[in-house]
Image (cartoon, rainbow, N blue to C red):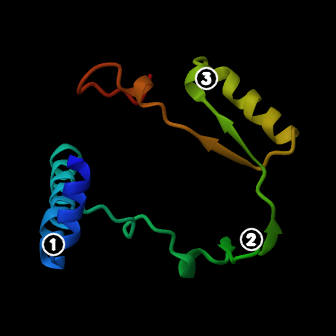
Amino acid sequence: MLIMELYNKLLELSSYYYFLLIVSPLLLVSLIYRYRWNIHYGSLPITSESVAFNQDKYKHIIRWDKRCFYIKGIPTVLCSGEFHYWRVPDRERWESILKMYVAGGLNCIRIYFHWGYHSPGKYLYIYFH
């Protein structure tokens, strides 16, 4: 019975009170969430303009359109594999493994940089072993 009375009173309220009771708490919660997000995760003014590919300068080597990727003017289908160098710690085997990729028909290699491998401790970074 109490629920029905509350429901009827809500129906009697004007749209202004509806806004105050329902919408404004939702807006407040979303603003608090956004504020807390910035405190914990921050926001960095990161852009890729300084490292973006200059297609005007290098279009004779690499270019693309919505249908194809071109290397030196030749339409090329990229067939890629992934190489985890930290899983093969002896560098003498790297060349033979990469040659096996080429023999298998791959023409592109993706390399994942494992930060746990390069940063074994807090504030400690090792790039060359």
Q: Tag 3, which secondary structure?
A: helix
Q: How far apart, in angstroms, are the residues tagged by discs 3 and 2?
A: 32 Å
Instruction: Name the residue tied to disc 3.
Output: 91
**Percent position (x, y) of residue 55?**
56, 77
Local crowd size for mark 3, using a 10 Å CA cut-off: few (<14), some (14–19), many (≥20): few
Question: Tag on residue 13?
Answer: 1
- 118 left or right, relative to 15: right
Q: Depth check: give the residue in front, 94 or 42.
A: 42
- 86 left or right, relative to 37: right
Instruction: Name the residue tied to disc 2.
Output: 70
Q: Hey, what amino acid is under mark 1?
A: Leu
Q: Tag 1, which secondary structure?
A: loop
- 78 left or right, relative to 57: right
Q: Tag 2, which secondary structure?
A: strand
Q: Determine the image quadrant of residue 124.
A: top left
Q: How far apart, in angstroms, are the residues tagged by discs 1 and 3?
A: 75 Å
With respect to residue 93, does 39 lie above or below? below
